[in-house]
Image: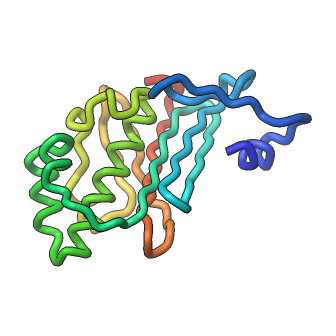
Amino acid sequence: MRQLIQKQRPQAGTPVLQSYDDARPELVGASDLAISWSKSGPVAAAALIENAVVGIDIERLVPRETDVILSMTASDSEAEAVSSAGDEAARLVAFYRLWTAKEAVLKCRGEGLRGGAKSVEILSDFILGRVDETVIEDRGVSLKLSVIDAGPDAVCTAAFSAQKSI
């Protein structure tokens, strides 16, 4: 994140970042700049945007049992989309597309998982990879979701808005 900030906004010294619990991270002294980052094993993603909000999440495609997680985080239609995605590999990608989208939106809110994953509804076409970009309404705010190519072994989604606050 610090390297990205230095590239976009060169400054003397090291950028000072602060984050508390699940709160939205901040660049000290730059209230007009929203930042987000995520790490999953050896892969990482960072995003920044001016005069808006942003959230990003990246996850490695690690095989896992998803039924329990889906029951706690997904609506019935989202869980159905994941289960209908095809073979095991396709279902795993669909699960991580859903998970990273929800995480990115919750990070946009500045809430993290405490914001309640079930409070975010992701469209089936996005989960199933029929579209890599979509717009959702979240608490009266339009957020654009965009899958970012993270290679064959990871899924990365960014959420962002043209509005400064949510």
Which quadrant is home to the N terminus? top right
Q: Residue at x 88, y 35 (%)?
A: 13
Which quadrant is home to the C terminus? top left
User: Which residue is more in the foreground, 115 or 124?
Assistant: 115
**Farthest residue, direction right:** 12
Q: Residue at x 64, y 26 (%)?
A: 18
Side of 162 relative to 1 (left or right)? left
Residue 136 picture location, percent across and down: 31, 42
Q: Residue at x 65, y 31 (%)?
A: 33
Side of 42 relative to 2 (left or right)? left
Q: Residue at x 39, y 57 (%)?
A: 133
Side of 45 relative to 156 (left or right)? right
Q: Is residue 102 above or below residue 107?
A: below
Q: Name the image quarter holding residue 147.
A: bottom left
Residue 102 picture location, percent across and down: 32, 44
User: Which residue is more in the foreground, 158 or 57?
Assistant: 57
Residue 144 picture location, percent across and down: 41, 46
Q: Name the image quarter holding residue 37.
A: top right
